[in-house]
């Protein structure tokens, strides 16, 4: 049984929910992140190390006396990674390779890594996408995630690391930011809360796999406590179009808005849905929150934040 886990990126959107799920499972948690959480105060039962994942000395300090590592940090998002691929490589690939070296040196044998089911495959040859689908990413973000996966595999073959790579789809839910860079559901809800117009790129038929963030956190904890290793898709296992999202947002908010339709973006993959059967079988896990329920819960949270901000 894992006693103490280091969550790298534990103050971020997904990371904060992983921390909650670990605490609920009775696991002691240390977090390494650059800054505190945006939407709530530090939790008294969590040990926080505020520092940079790319700093080897801060990373070494954070790894002291932990049994396992949950790595969910990224310095980039898909839409911005191509602007500076060198920074993407430096901040994510090199830092994670350094982490793997330290895990070996410190005899830490368990790692759960959040990869990206939305970007490592590139344009799907078939849907739903299984884990053995070819990897042909079209963003630096996806290329770096894919390379990290291969370094993890190398470390497993050469040492005694047991690692689970989770290829996450599109997580959404409470504590998702409102910058508009990533996360269509969170972006739409925040815009509505501020009385702003919503935009749809293309005709709204682009399809993605959206997973509620607490379902995502649950599979992370299940993976940590299992004796499984390897690569697993982590999504809802079903596709919803942007037009479906618009409808779900209408239903959750009670607002009868009309989005503005813009020209389609060339880099948007038309459809990607993840096959999650391998994860279901390995971890005894399945997503529990429907899209409509998840959007409704997210809207309640956004409203509470908007009221708090005045």
Image (spheres, rainbow, N blue to C red):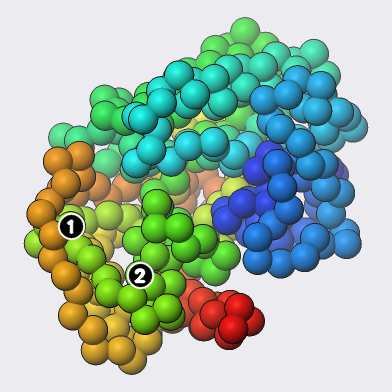
Residue at horizontal 34 percent and vertical 37 percent from the top: 119
Query: Residue 201 has which mark?
Result: 1
Query: Is residue 304 in view?
Result: no
Residue at horizontal 71 percent and vertical 42 percent from the top: 33
In this image, 115 relative to 105: left or right?
Answer: left
Position in image of residue 28 (x %, y %): 84, 50
Position in image of residue 123 (x %, y %): 20, 35
- The residue lying toward the viewer, choosing from 39 and 152, is 39
Compared to residue 189, the image places residue 61 above or below, namely above
Crowd band around label 2 with a 10 angstrom C-alpha radius: few (<14), some (14–19), many (20+): many
Query: Residue 188 has which mark?
Result: 2
Quadrant of the image containing the N terminus: top right
Position in image of residue 58 (x %, y %): 80, 28
Position in image of residue 206 (x %, y %): 17, 55
Residue at horizontal 18 percent and vertical 80 percent from the top: 258
Query: Residue 304 has which mark?
Result: none
Count of numbered labels shown in the rendering: 2
- The residue lying toward the viewer, choosing from 25 and 249, is 249
Ranked by sequence position, the earlier of labels 1 and 2 is 2
- Residue 64, picture quadrant: top right
Label 1, secondary structure: give it: strand
- The residue lying toward the viewer, choosing from 188 and 194, is 194
Compared to residue 266, the image places residue 60 above or below, namely above
In this image, 187 relative to 162: left or right?
Answer: left
Compared to residue 254, the image places residue 172 above or below, namely above
- The residue lying toward the viewer, choosing from 221 and 31, is 31
Label 2, secondary structure: give it: helix
Query: Is residue 208 in view?
Result: yes
């Amino acid at each position: 049984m894992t006693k103490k886990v280091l969550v790298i990126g534990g103050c971020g959107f997904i990371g904060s929910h992983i921390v909650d799920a670990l605490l609920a499972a009775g696991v002691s948690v240390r977090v390494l992140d650059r800054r505190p959480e945006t939407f709530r105060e530090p939790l008294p039962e969590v040990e926080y190390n505020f520092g940079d994942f790319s700093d080897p000395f801060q990373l070494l300090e954070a790894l002291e006396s932990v049994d396992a590592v949950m790595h969910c940090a990224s310095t980039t998002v898909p839409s911005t990674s191509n602007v500076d691929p060198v920074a993407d490589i430096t901040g994510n690939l090199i830092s994670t390779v350094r982490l793997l070296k330290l895990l070996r040196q410190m005899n830490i044998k368990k790692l759960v890594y959040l990869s990206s089911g939305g970007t490592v495959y590139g344009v799907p040859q078939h849907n739903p996408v299984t884990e053995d689908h070819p990897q042909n990413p079209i963003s630096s973000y996806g290329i770096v995630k894919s390379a990290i996966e291969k370094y993890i595999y190398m470390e497993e073959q050469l040492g005694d690391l047991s690692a689970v790579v989770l290829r996450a789809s599109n997580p959404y839910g409470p504590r998702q930011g409102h910058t508009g860079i990533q996360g269509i559901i969170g972006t739409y809800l925040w815009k509505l809360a501020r009385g702003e117009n919503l935009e749809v790129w293309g005709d709204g038929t682009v399809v993605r796999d959206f997973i509620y963030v607490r379902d995502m956190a649950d599979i992370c904890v299940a993976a940590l406590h299992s004796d499984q290793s390897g690569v697993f898709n982590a999504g809802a296992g079903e596709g919803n179009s942007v037009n479906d999202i618009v409808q779900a947002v209408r239903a959750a908010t009670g607002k009868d808005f009309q989005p503005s339709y813009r020209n389609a973006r060339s880099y948007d993959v038309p459809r990607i849905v993840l096959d999650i059967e391998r994860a279901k079988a390995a971890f005894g896990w399945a997503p529990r929150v429907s899209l409509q329920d998840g959007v409704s819960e997210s809207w309640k949270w956004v409203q509470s934040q908007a009221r708090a901000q005045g």
